[in-house]
Amino acid sequence: MKNGKQKNWYLTIGIILTACMLIFIAVGFFWTPYVPSAMSSGDRNGRPSLRHLFGCDSFGRDIFSRTLEGAGSTLTIALAVLAVGAVCGLIIGALCGYYGGAADALIMRLCDAIAAFPSVLLAMVVLAVTGPGKYNVIGALGVLFIPSFARLVRGEFLKYRDRDFVQSARLTGVSDLRVIFVHILPNTWPVLLSGLTIGFNNAVLAEASMSYLGIGVSAQEPSLGYMLKDAQGYFFTLPWCTAFPAAVVILLILGVGLLGEGIRERMGVAS
Amino acid sequence: MSNAIVHIEHLNSWYGKGKERKQVLRDVSVELAPGEVLGIVGESGSGKTTLAKCVLGMVTDITGELAVNSQRPQMVFQDPYGSLNPAKTVGWILEEPLRAAGVKDREERRRRVAELLPLVGLEEEHLARKPAQLSGGQRQRVAIAAALIQGSKLIVLDEPVSALDVTLQAQILRLLAELKERLGLSYLFISHDLAVVYQLCDRVAVMTGGEIVEAGDVDEIYDHPKHPYTKKLLDASLALD
Ligand SMILES: Nc1ncnc2c1ncn2[C@@H]1O[C@H](COP(=O)(O)OP(=O)(O)O)[C@@H](O)[C@H]1O
Ligand SMILES: [Mg+2]
């Protein structure tokens, strides 16, 4: 038996870290100290200093400004991927779990087939056909994220669909759709939230990997992954070009990961 | 027979499909008159819940005669931890059957909930709580209120007090008896405990292995049990006292 008042450090640190990262990224949407793409010849290869907190790259672009912008791009893509995957996965998983039957079996088989391959690999194949670009990345990764959400949500709905309170609702004449989305869905939030944190991190990593491999976003909207690729030739000579974008990716993933762990821990105590 | 609220004759029911198909109810015949409390007793697995689900139309693989002359009969489940939506407040849970019945006006729903609350022994302050913040007895009162709020006259009570301790059992049984008189209800009351059935029921049917082996007035069955299975049940419930 766990003490109910025991401090949930994962949750606390996760919330704080995630909030800090989100504030950092949000600032980047409205303000950057320099224009991220502006090159200043005097600052080429500049070390981190008070003028340029994160230093400058070989073109004299301010890494701090570029990191702010790149993090915004990474966050936008990850959230969009998550939105596509989670919304479709939620609807498919809820209907499959609630109704079961042959359609459910078929769809889950299909999900297994898709999930058997690493999503980055599949996304590469898709992008090889559609070409790179922000929206193609979002579409490809989003669709590939559906199966894991569908499976997660389906499991929850299987758990709840024969509960007495669901039967009560049906007896009083509540429609199936309302039972699914109003009666059952709110009970699955903790599991869904924790799934969303995992999905978010996978999306950040997948986008970064794809940009790193040169099949992701374009140079006009550099993400953190794109910056890492850009900087790989200067890994030893200009380490700050790699270190700061990488640190932002790591801290973001760490924060959201701890948040998810905290939610799971909390859920475990409650049930 | 014509004015019975529940009329069941030669009812058989099955679960599963194909090779898995398994008969549960065998040639069950019972009748529930308006205003009456019919007890169904039998050990766990004898098919009591299945019979209840047949009456509520939740089991569809059946043969025989089954007539229910009541609008939207409702059920109170054994486990008040499972029968109330853990994610919702008591107020929401009690309003939901009204929403489902098409009562669009929020004030009207609130008024009807507020009217029912004192009848089941709940207070306004309970409305804002989640089921987890209520005691077992309070939860069962909420479940009873939710079954009554649509104005249903036929209530199926599936072991409604089995999960409660003896003091609470007595309270809930008294409440059920009161509600029956006040609102003119009929109960199909399921229990594995003859002593509990004796307190509330007018008539009782004894079930084992999906069959009804003996049925009649509760006093008659209690004082002069005929079937050996009934005697065994009686001995068991007397031994507990
Ligand atoms: N949904 C179901 N599917 C298959 N078998 C079931 C189902 N529900 C109950 N049974 C079986 O039917 C029999 C009667 O169960 P039930 O009606 O719940 O008995 P009781 O309520 O008297 O304990 C038991 O053998 C049980 O295993
Ligand atoms: Mg039962």
Image: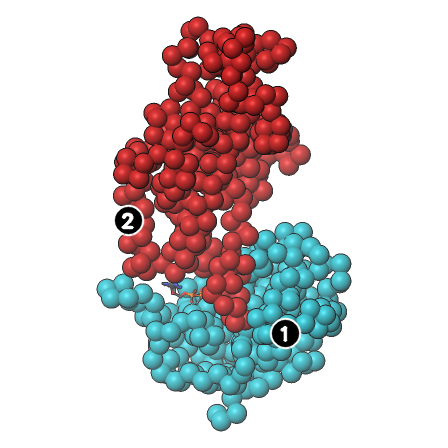
Give the residue at x 55% y 33%: A259
Q: Which chain is red?
A: A
Secondary structure found at label 1: loop
Q: Chain of mark 1?
A: B
**Along the line of sight, the residue nearer the viewer: B140 or A13:** A13
Q: Chain of mark 2?
A: A
**Amino acid at the residue labelled 2:** Arg
Q: Which chain is cyan?
A: B
Image-based side of B159 in relation to A203, left or right = right
Which quadrant is home to the C terminus of chain B? Answer: bottom right
Res B201 quadrant in image: bottom right
Identify whether A50 is placed above or below B19. Answer: above
**Along the line of sight, the residue nearer the viewer: A199 or A238:** A238
Res A3 quadrant in image: top right
**Amino acid at the residue labelled 1:** Val
Image-based side of B37 in relation to A148, left or right = right
* Alpha carbon distance from label 1 to label 2: 42 Å
Q: Answer yes or no: is residue A56 visible.
A: no
Q: Which mark is residue A93?
A: none
Give the residue at x 32% y 46%: A111
Whole-percent x and y of residue A185?
51, 53
Whole-percent x and y of residue B234?
51, 70
Whole-percent x and y of residue B71?
54, 81
The image's colour scheme reads by chain
Ligand 1 found in image quarter: bottom left
Identify whether A120 is placed above or below A99. Answer: above
**Contact, mark 1 vs mark 2 (Cβ under 8 Å):** no
Secondary structure found at label 2: helix
Could you classify mark 1 by the number of other residues whose Cα lies within 10 Å: few (under 14), some (14-19), or many (20 or more)? some
Mark 1 sits on what residue? B103
Mark 2 sits on what residue? A109
Give the residue at x 69% y 68%: B106
